[in-house]
Image: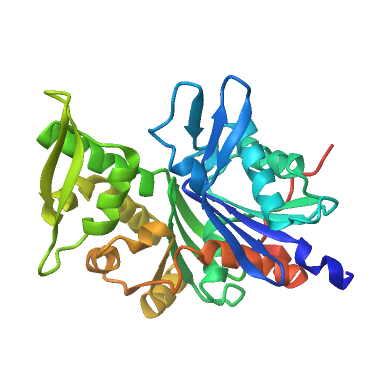
Amino acid sequence: MANSFLGRDLAVDLGTANTLVYVRGRGVVLSEPSVVATNTATNTIVAVGTAAKQMIGRTPGTITAIRPLKDGVIADFDAAEKMLRYFIQQVHKRRYFAKPRLVVCVPSGITTVEQRAVRDAGYQAGARMVYLIEEPMAAAVGAGLPVHEPTGNMVVDIGGGTTEVAIISLGGIVTSCSIRVAGDELDKAVISYLKKEYSLMLGERTAEEIKSTIGSAFPVPDEPEADVRGRDLVSGLPKTVTVSTDEIRKALEEPVNAIIDAVRTTLDTCPPELAGDIVRRGIILTGGGALLNGLAARLQHETGVPVRVADDPLQSVAAGAGMCVEEFETLRRVLVSEPRKR
């Protein structure tokens, strides 16, 4: 391939919460929220990414800010395609003729129809070839695990829409579990807890902020408190309440338990030879959900297996997909094979 085209191939971690784009030879060059704001009157895009996220819950009647992906899969095809096209153009500013090869990350529990939607969105957005890679596989490659060796590697990737748990050996997924409980569910749990306990209505962004600042999955000493602002459901007026870390932990209990159960289920179906490897090597946590305070400690406590968080959990999946772009021939067999066209 000519040098001028080296930067062309892309890997996209098309996430429910954030989309990351990796450019061959340059690394991760773009990380933006997966949000599109459109003007419903003219059907044009007003903003994409960070600018659009700031509009969520704050738009006038003619503008809607939506997230085109739900539970890790495309919910609004047109918006997803426009968002992907926008991100590709952001990266290839001066190269409108460039038709890149595209590696896109998808959840492991994705159906053939959902796979086709992702492929179609990639082609519509201007890709020459679209390849898919399962998120836990990409996360394992990105976290630097020896995926091609005959040893068991276990990855728990907690994104915005899905939690992917997989045991990987010899370049393939031996057993996996994909549940639609992840960062978004944690946010919803915070919203419903404050609604029930304090009759306080919160927005998505506020809930996410609370989760990141004082949310936790395991008790730690000196737990902070935070003031939360929202709308009082009784009087309809703005109100501020003070909540403790312990309360937020209680709020997050149900989704956190669902994630722990998924890990247990996967360990339960793991072949004994690989189970020994996992006890020795431990479990790797990646994805934005891995940043929840005390989650690694809680998982270790519940399973008895050492757990560690990947070096850069937010970028592991994008970095792994990026490695497939860099060393395409070597890593080609970890990609999802395309159904043959009849």
Q: Is residue 228 visible?
A: yes
Task: Give whichever of 126, 48 is nearer the camera.
Answer: 48
Q: In the picture, residue 213 is in which quadrant? A: bottom left
In this picture, is 328 found above or below 55? below
Write the residue at 12% across / 49% down: 243
Nearer to me, 97 or 275: 97
Q: Is residue 302 above or below residue 209?
A: below
Which quadrant of the structure image shows residue 197? top left
Question: 63 and 72: which one is in front?
Answer: 63
Query: Is there any visible trace of residue 268 in the rendered image?
Result: no
Q: Number of labelled discs?
A: 0
Residue at image location 63% in from the left, 22% down from the top: 42
**Looking at the rendering, in which quadrant would you find the N terminus?**
bottom right
Position in image of residue 272 (x %, y %): 42, 69
Left or right: where 164 falls relative to 232: right
In this rendering, position of residue 39 left or right of residue 244? right
Q: Quadrant of the C terminus?
A: top right
- Which of 254/75 is in front? 75
Q: Residue furthest bottom?
A: 280
Give residue 2's position: percent from left, percent from top: 89, 70
Residue 134 percent location from the top left of the image:
58, 55
Residue that appears at 12% across and 23% down = 235
Question: Could you say which quadrant of the image residue 305 lies in?
Answer: bottom left
Question: What colour-coding does the image apply?
Answer: rainbow
